[in-house]
Amino acid sequence: MDGLRLACVYSWNCEKARLFKVSDLLLDFAKSGRGDENLIKKALALLDTDEFYQKIARDNFREGDMFNKRTVSSYWRGSPVLTGSIWHNYTTIEPIIKLPIEAIDADMINECLVHAGMVESVKDGVLEIKYRPIVKKEKELAIGSYARRSIDRVFPDSVSEGDLVAFHFFSSTEVISDNDAARLANITEFSLKKFNGERKNNIKN
């Protein structure tokens, strides 16, 4: 799967895609790879991720194409060579740094972030997975204990019990490796630590 399709895989069901009514367009392209690529790029530009793709491509891979697969994957799942805090799980929570903890909805955070989960069962269009959700702990956000939940099976075509999958808005996106899952957990933990630290500084000021 190329980078443009991968961007659609992770983006098609996000809040802004639904708001701008481009979800079906992005989903169709993610599944088939067929369609007007310029139209797809215009739809993705509505979701405010272009600036992150561009920065990752320029600063980390010296790429001119922001939709090369390494760049897109690095934004959504992290990369060993990625510099800065420009992965999805940080850029998603950064805008709410100044909110009081009481106003932060952990369920909404879990919907918006990319998680890794272990598939425990596969049934029709549903995967039963085990993962570690984000929780509110005292006055901070933290990675919680393991929990089970159902997610929609959308990508990829083949998923089996015991697979590790990435998921976004509670829909599967990719089967990933142990290393990928560990990296995603690490960047999420780092993102929360950075988020909590900056919140404290904002509250003091």
Image (cartoon, rainbow, N blue to C red):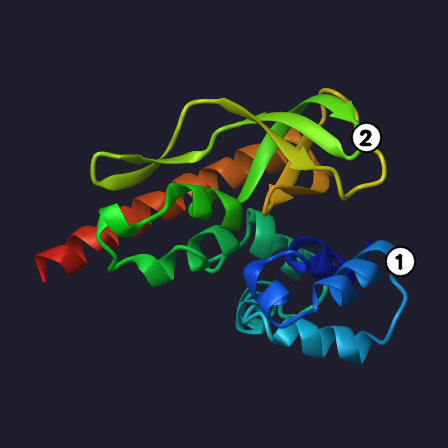
Q: Which mark is residue 124?
A: 2
| Quadrant in which the C terminus is drawn | bottom left
Instruction: Identify the residue at horizontal 59%, vertical 52% (top origin).
Output: 76
Residue 119 x/y as whole percent: 68, 25
Q: Which residue is disc 1 drawn over?
A: 32
Instruction: Identify the residue at horizontal 62%, vertical 26% (top origin).
Output: 129
Q: Nearer the viewer, residue 176 or 145?
A: 145
- Amino acid under label 1? Ser
**Separation of residues labelled 2 and 1 (CA atoms):** 20 Å
Residue 97 x/y as whole percent: 29, 57
Instruction: Identify the residue at horizontal 62%, vertical 72% (top origin).
Output: 20
Drawn side of residue 17 relative to residue 68, left or right: left
Residue 98 x/y as whole percent: 24, 60
Image position of 20 with respect to 86: above or below? below
Residue 95 x/y as whole percent: 36, 63
Q: Nearer the viewer, residue 23 or 196?
A: 23
Identify the secondary structure beneath mark 2: loop
Q: Are marks 2 and 1 in contact (CB under 8 Å)?
A: no
- Amino acid under label 2? Asp
Image position of 38 with respect to 130: above or below? below
Q: Nearer the viewer, residue 186 or 60?
A: 186
Identify the secondary structure beneath mark 1: helix
Asked where in the image residue 192 lies, by quadrant, the reply is top left
Q: Residues within 10 Å of mark 1 (few under 14, many from 20)?
A: few
Q: Residues within 10 Å of mark 2 (few under 14, many from 20)?
A: few
The residue furthest left is: 204
Drawn side of residue 5 relative to residue 190, left or right: right
